Image (cartoon, helix red, strand yellow):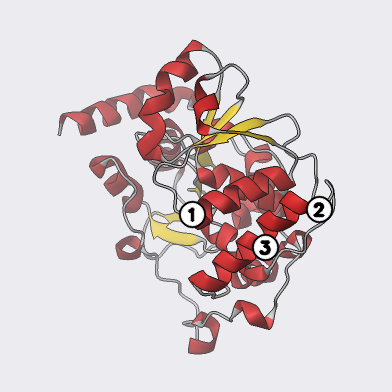
Amino acid sequence: MRQNSLYASLQCVVHPAQLDAVELQALEACLRDGGAVLLDAQAARGNAVTHIVCHPEAYASFVAQRNERFVALVRPEWVFRTFLLQKLLPVDRFSPNPALIFSTLAISAGSMAKDPRKVINGLISHFGGQVVDQKEVHAGATHILYQDEGGKDAGVVPEQLERQKQLQLSYSKTDLGRSVEKWCRHLATEPAGTAFALPSCVVAYMGQRAGLDTQHHVKFTWIEECVLRQCRVPEGPFAHQPTGPAPTKADQKARSWKTQPELHLEDLNLSKCAQVYKLGRTELGTELSVVRKLSNEVSIL
């Protein structure tokens, strides 16, 4: 069941810069559906706002305000992920600061040896990501790292596979736009608390924007390349090749959202994705000096 008070304590500004019309509408619909008060863009400078949702390119506009008093600056992914999980998540793991290249990501280096894992975990935290240490919540990670090609595969549980298939439903931009507009009209015209049956294309879109539709299995050198380039690079060239049978064409082909017109959030089974932030750690520990040294060396290059 969706909570109509999930965002009840929030007074939000969704800054439109770099957001397309559908994304802007979907963000505002999520927040309204969960009980948030939405303020216009001019209110971002005022005292009432508690959260500003913005694209990384707009981050610099709000740094001074954030430093003057506490205002949570978050990426759009924070809204979509908290809505899908129906749980508020740490805002610092979703910072729009473009320097935090692993922001929004939950990364497990569990299959690596202890010493390199310490350094990798330090880099993940230093650059804004969530470290996933506990094996029981690996299914909720966005990325699984491997030290070499022969590393043992992290198993994909059936529930995780089904969730990914549901969030990988295909849809047209036209269908998505119409469905989001229908949701917005419902929120504007129906009494507060009246549930809106979410079209599966909208849920799939939010899951894809939240990064929950695919779990990336990559070599640890992907982390090194991201740090070197100071941005998130594509995972493809660093993909860890599983030792099991290759997926069939039927497995790879996404189903149309019209085969399942509505989708309930509880059917997604996203509990592991929420537990990542409950059980995961964000502290840098004794590796902080190593990480600072590495990041300083990168900035000189």
Q: Are marks 1 and 3 in contact (CB under 8 Å)?
A: no
Mark found first going from the N terminus, 1 or 2: 1
Closer to the camera in the image, 244 or 214: 214
Q: Residue furthest left?
A: 301
- Residue 64 in the image, given as x and y percentages of width and height: 41, 17
Residue holding disc 1? 21
Does residue 276 sit above or below 194 in this rendering?
A: above
Closer to the camera in the image, 163 or 124: 163
Residue holding disc 2? 190
Judge from the rendering whether residue 189 lies leftward or rightward of residue 82; answer left or right: right
Residue holding disc 3? 182
Does residue 204 sit above or below 253 in this rendering?
A: above
Q: Are marks 1 and 2 in contact (CB under 8 Å)?
A: no
Split into 4 quadrants, where in the image is the C terminus? top left
Amino acid type of the residue tagged 1 in the rendering: Ala
Q: Quadrant of residue 139?
A: bottom right
Q: Are marks 2 and 3 in contact (CB under 8 Å)?
A: no
- Residue 117 in the image, given as x and y percentages of width and height: 44, 42
Q: Residue furthest top?
A: 68
Judge from the rendering whether residue 275 lies leftward or rightward of residue 254; answer left or right: right
Q: Residues within 10 Å of mark 1 (few under 14, many from 20)?
A: few
Mark found first going from the N terminus, 1 or 3: 1
The residue at 64%/38% (across/down) is: 89
Q: Residues within 10 Å of mark 3 (few under 14, many from 20)?
A: some
Mark found first going from the N terminus, 2 or 3: 3
